[in-house]
Image: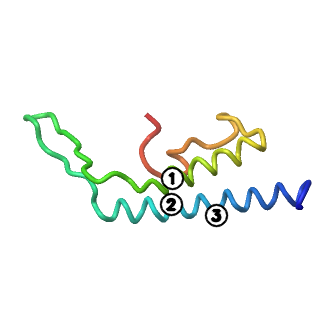
């Protein structure tokens, strides 16, 4: 069994792999153009997303967040998800 600093390093490496996998899957999903923007009226638009993101993205993200929490990272200590994934603006 791996313990101590070696265990911590293994877990952080796993979290980094999850992050790379998440970014790759988001890029594939976004490239497929899973959304449509429909004009409702003159100044209003409606975003329609008929194809949901793959469940694997949320599973990997959940595991990654759990690993970070094991190390005591808080919201203040970890970049916001929009900064990690490079999408949205955090609102």
Q: What element carries label 2?
A: helix
* Label at residue 17: 3
Q: Earlier in the sequence, mark 3 or mark 2?
A: 3
Q: Position of residue 15 (x, y in %)?
A: 67, 56
Q: What element carries label 3?
A: helix
**Mark 3 touches mark 2? (CB < 8 Å):** no
Q: How crowded is mark 2: few (under 14 residues within 10 Å), some or many (20 or more)?
A: some
Residue at 65% x, 35% y is: 75
Place residue 71 in its image quadrant: top right
Residue at 49% x, 57% y is: 56
Q: Earlier in the sequence, mark 1 or mark 2?
A: 2
Residue at 74% x, 56% y is: 12
Q: Position of residue 65 (x, y in %)?
A: 64, 45
* Label at residue 85: 1
| Closer-to-camera residue (25/37) | 25
**Mark 1 touches mark 2? (CB < 8 Å):** yes
Q: Distance between the residues labelled 3 and 1?
A: 13 Å
In the rendered image of this protein, does residue 17 appear above or below residue 74?
Answer: below
Q: In this view, does 87 lie to the left or right of 18?
A: left
Image depth: mark 3 or mark 1 in front:
3
Give the position of the C terminus as an image quadrant: top left
In the rendered image of this protein, does residue 84 appear above or below residue 18?
Answer: above
* Label at residue 23: 2
Q: How crowded is mark 3: few (under 14 residues within 10 Å), some or many (20 or more)?
A: some
Q: Is residue 75 left or right of residue 13?
A: left
């Amino acid at each position: 069994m791996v313990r101590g600093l070696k265990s911590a390093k293994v877990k952080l490496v796993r979290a980094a792999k999850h992050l790379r996998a998440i970014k790759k899957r988001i890029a594939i999903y976004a490239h497929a153009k899973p959304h449509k923007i429909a004009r409702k009226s003159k100044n209003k638009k409606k975003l329609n997303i008929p194809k949901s993101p793959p469940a694997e993205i949320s599973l990997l993200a959940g595991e990654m967040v759990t690993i970070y929490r094991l190390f005591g990272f808080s919201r203040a200590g970890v970049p916001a998800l929009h900064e990690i994934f490079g999408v949205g603006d955090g609102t």
